[in-house]
């Protein structure tokens, strides 16, 4: 381990390093035998895989982390980026963690542009830079309850947030790189979190590609990343709306760029327009017939991915169509979608089914095709109950305002789907619900709904109290009248007369018998 100055002896990084299946795949595309500088904290599996086929040097500011990496047989420069000598030259510089964790409190504090210039000087002519840039206006920032300009961890002694000098969109990023003598070979938008994305797509793919399928994949990735995490709003809906609305590149969590220093290298990186991976890695690319196709690039043991090879299903996500129909109170469409879904794919969740309209732009057209988006996902139990949970948990308006609890709404949806007998199965599977983001905006909507119900219950209770009071007064009046009449002389004479008449009647009946 080489101490270059600016090292931090008692500091360890308190945020996760850059890693994951997609970052690992990008690193695998780098040329064999190259001299590579890995700048900043990166996952051990990524560094080790790269070191197995290239000469790797790691630049780390944390001395304990540097010692750990050196123990695995990797050369380490321990210190600040500002202290790296100009004599260091590399064929490839990998900075998938970004440029925020390359300087220390023991040396000069370089901003984003100065850090980029320092890394550019470390590249040989024809060298490649693989860089990640976090988006300060990404969906992950919009749903974060904490402020990016407040010190949230020991490593954030300079929480600049949106006041940093980093570019604010992909176009400005490409322009900044070009100004530093770096030509962009490939640029992608990463979702849903910067340090471990599970979806990377180029701006052209997000604008001109299968928007509905990409929106569904983005929402699914956000659901897994933010399960049970406290957020301001549900990131699934924001991510899907951003991609479908053409704002996918602008609201992505980060941008990944492969750039080179002139002259252009003979083995420039060639990457697909869309990469998906939370373990396995799948490529999406345009097909010859105008559609898009899927191809598995990297498999994982124990998971059959053969069904993912082939054309990408067309259509909109079933969950979004159902939510829109519920918001419109369009009961015929809700029943049609539910019955078609449960008949075609009863074990596939609504967020894993796409609906394609054949030869029509109207949803009421009789020909609807239901296709599972990811066939490798195991069958789920009581998928209608899961949709009911989404409907209630998200605070969505629906045609059944009296159904305020999950069992009641589940029973109604089962009946609408023509499967009322399945409601008991849904109740038995109550413990199998997937974890959802803990969204504060949805909590506020639930609180507002509860307040409306409470106000309605209060109004009903007040009406019943008034009605009881009125009837109580009538009852007291009747009792007073009865008491007054029962004590009068006329009442007693009438009562005696009724008694004599009754006895005479009884004797007459006995005589006749």
Image: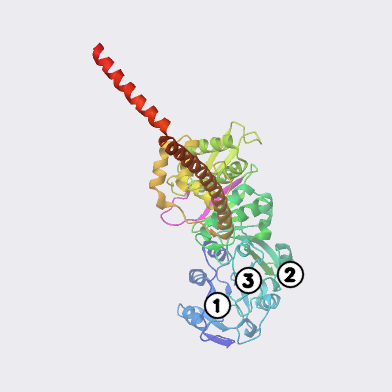
Q: Residue furthest top?
A: 512
Viewer-nearest residue: 64 or 453: 453
Q: Residue furthest front?
A: 489
Query: Going 43% across and 36% down the picture, which residue do you hit?
Result: 482
Q: Is residue 305 left or right of residue 325?
A: left
Query: Going 42% across and 56% down the picture, which residue do you hit?
Result: 301
Please provide percent x and percent y for residue 230. 54, 63
Residue pointed to by mark 3: 148
Quick one: SS at disc 3?
loop
Query: Going 24% across and 15% down the picture, which residue do you hit?
Result: 510
Question: Which one is closest to the eye, mark 2 or mark 3?
Answer: 3
Residue pointed to by mark 2: 176
Residue pointed to by mark 1: 58
Q: Determine whether label 1 and label 3 are within 8 Å by CB.
A: no
Quick one: SS at disc 2?
helix
The magenta-colored residue range is 292-306
Give the number of the disc on residue 435. Answer: none
Please provide percent x and percent y for residue 409. 49, 44
The quarter in which the C terminus is drawn is top left
Please provide percent x and percent y for residue 404. 50, 47
């Amino acid at each position: 381990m080489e101490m270059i100055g600016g090292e931090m002896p008692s500091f360890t990084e308190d945020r996760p390093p850059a890693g994951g299946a997609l970052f690992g795949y990008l690193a695998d595309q780098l040329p064999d035998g190259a001299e590579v500088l890995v700048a900043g904290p990166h996952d051990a599996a990524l560094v080790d895989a790269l070191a197995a086929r290239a000469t790797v040097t790691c630049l780390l500011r944390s001395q304990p982390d540097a010692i750990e990496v050196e123990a695995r047989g990797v050369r380490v420069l321990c210190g600040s980026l500002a202290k790296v000598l100009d004599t260091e030259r590399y064929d490839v510089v990998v900075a998938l963690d970004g440029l925020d964790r390359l300087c220390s409190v023991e040396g000069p504090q370089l901003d984003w542009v100065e850090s980029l210039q320092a890394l550019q000087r470390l590249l040989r002519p024809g060298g490649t830079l693989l860089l990640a840039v976090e988006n300060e206006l990404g969906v992950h920032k919009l749903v974060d309850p904490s402020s990016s300009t407040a010190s949230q961890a020991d490593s954030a002694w300079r929480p600049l947030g949106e006041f940093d000098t980093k570019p604010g969109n992909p176009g400005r990023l490409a322009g900044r790189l070009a100004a530093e003598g770096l030509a962009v070979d490939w640029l992608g938008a990463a979702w849903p979190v910067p340090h471990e994305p599970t979806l990377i797509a180029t701006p052209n793919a997000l604008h001109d590609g299968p928007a509905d399928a990409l929106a569904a994949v983005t929402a699914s990735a956000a659901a897994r990343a933010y399960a049970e995490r406290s957020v301001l709003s549900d990131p699934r809906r924001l991510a899907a709306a951003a991609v479908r609305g053409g704002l996918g590149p602008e609201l992505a969590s980060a941008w990944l760029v492969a750039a080179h220093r002139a002259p252009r290298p003979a083995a420039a990186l060639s990457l697909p327009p869309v990469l998906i991976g939370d373990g396995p890695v799948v490529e999406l690319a345009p097909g010859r017939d105008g559609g898009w196709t899927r191809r598995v690039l990297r498999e994982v043991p124990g998971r059959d991915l053969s069904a993912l090879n082939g054309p990408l299903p067309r259509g909109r996500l079933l969950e979004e169509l159902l939510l829109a129909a519920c918001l419109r109170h369009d009961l015929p469409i809700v029943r049609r979608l539910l019955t078609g879904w449960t008949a075609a794919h009863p074990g596939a969740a609504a967020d894993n089914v796409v609906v394609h309209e054949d030869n029509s732009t109207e949803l009421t057209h009789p020909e609807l095709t239901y296709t599972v988006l990811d066939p490798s996902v195991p069958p789920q139990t009581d998928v209608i109950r899961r949709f009911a949970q989404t409907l209630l948990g998200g605070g969505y308006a629906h045609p059944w305002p009296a159904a305020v609890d999950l069992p009641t709404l589940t029973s109604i949806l089962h009946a609408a789907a023509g499967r009322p007998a399945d409601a008991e199965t849904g109740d038995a599977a109550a413990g199998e619900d997937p974890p959802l983001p803990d969204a504060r905006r949805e909590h506020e909507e639930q609180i507002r709904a509860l307040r409306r119900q409470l106000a309605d219950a209060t109004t009903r209770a007040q009406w019943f109290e008034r009605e009881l009071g009125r009837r109580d007064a009538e009852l007291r009046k009747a009792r007073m009248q009865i008491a007054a009449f029962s004590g009068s002389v006329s009442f007693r004479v009438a009562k005696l007369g009724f008694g004599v008449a009754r006895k005479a009647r009884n004797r007459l009946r006995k005589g006749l018998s």
